[in-house]
Amino acid sequence: MQFRIEHETRFHYDAPIFESVMELRMQPRTDASQRCLAFDVTIEPEARAYRYSDALGNTVHHFNVPSRHESLMVRAVSLVEVADASPPSRGSADDWAALDALRDSPDHWDWLHPSHFARPGEALEKFAAEMKVARRGDPRSTLEALHDSISRAIRYERGSTRVDSPIEECLAQRKGVCQDFAHVFIALARQMGIPTRYVSGHLVQVTADGAVASEGATHAWAESFVPGAGWVGFDSSNRQPAGAGHIRVAIGRDYADVPPTRGMFRGDARTELSVRVTATRDAGNRTTPMQAQRSGAHA
């Protein structure tokens, strides 16, 4: 199945600014579950985007607008082919020994230790005790129980936190957005010795009549490493496992590693940000716009 995804971000300034420098993480990854067949980025005012791959294999585009401007628009268009996700195999108690052997592995170091937004604290410890978070028979069953506990205990509410909110805010009010769900899941899974990482991307779903729908703009979820199954995705904010509709754009330790846009400008102005994502099934002509108006780009 192929999807065409248009991701448009607009920055509006309340006074003229004189230079913008920005990097983008908007190009979907190519891996075993999906292929990015085409990608194009348009910038207004016009600028040339340069590309490189970061240490985690994410594609990063960066550009500079040196002229005076009062708004900035970035439009990224992707064509992505996704494969049907097969359910991971069930695990066994022996998988815990395999995970424990990874504790000192450089390949999994970042996924096992605290990071900026996924770190231990008193609020997290109280939540873990309340949810009775602990290793169970095998890692896969443990992760499914954790996913279920977070999904039931925390309510999704758009705009209830900010992109820079610590997990303590989400845990205190028991509501948050997708990145909060992911950060809580990541922090608790790592405490149990399970390598876990943050994924930014898009959630698209094909309905019975062939339309493409989504619950928000860009999206975020978590992936954990399970012996014998590889990386398994958990979308706790939607109470579902990550599947073919979860289009992966970037992976990182947490949101701080993979914001869709990151930059700075020269001038004295306040910024208003708007984000719009449209997904279209490439084989048809049905389109559903998905919009978000918030600071940052994750739903």
Image (cartoon, grey):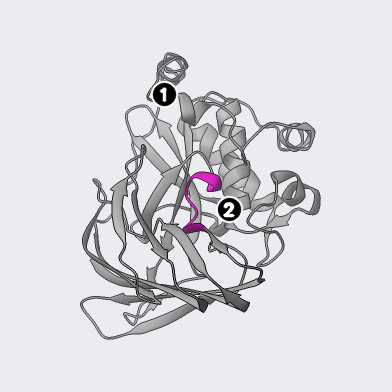
Provide the residue designation for mark 1.
92
Relative side of 230 to 240, left or right: left
What residue is shown at x 62% (from left), y 70% (from top)? 294
Nearest the viewer among 24 and 39 is 24
Q: Quick one: SS at disc 2?
A: helix
Tell which residue pokes out farthest to the bottom in this image: 285
Residue 6 on the magenta span = no
Number of residues whose C-alpha sits closer than 10 Å to that of mark 2, classed few (under 14), some (14–19) or many (20 or more): many
Quadrant of the rendered image containing residue 287: bottom left
Residue 163: % across, % down: 63, 56
What residue is shown at x 45% (from left), y 14% (from top)? 104
Q: Quick one: SS at disc 1?
A: loop
- Tell me where the magenta segment starts and ends, as one range: 255-263
Q: Earlier in the sequence, mark 1 or mark 2?
A: 1
- Residues tagged 1 and 2 counted as in contact (Cβ below 8 A): no
Residue 254: % across, % down: 53, 43
Quadrant of the rendered image containing residue 178: bottom right
What residue is shown at x 35% (from left), y 42% (from top)? 54
Residue 198: % across, % down: 49, 44
Residue 195: % across, % down: 47, 29
C-alpha separation, residue under disc 1 versus residue under disc 2: 30 Å
Provide the residue designation for mark 2.
179
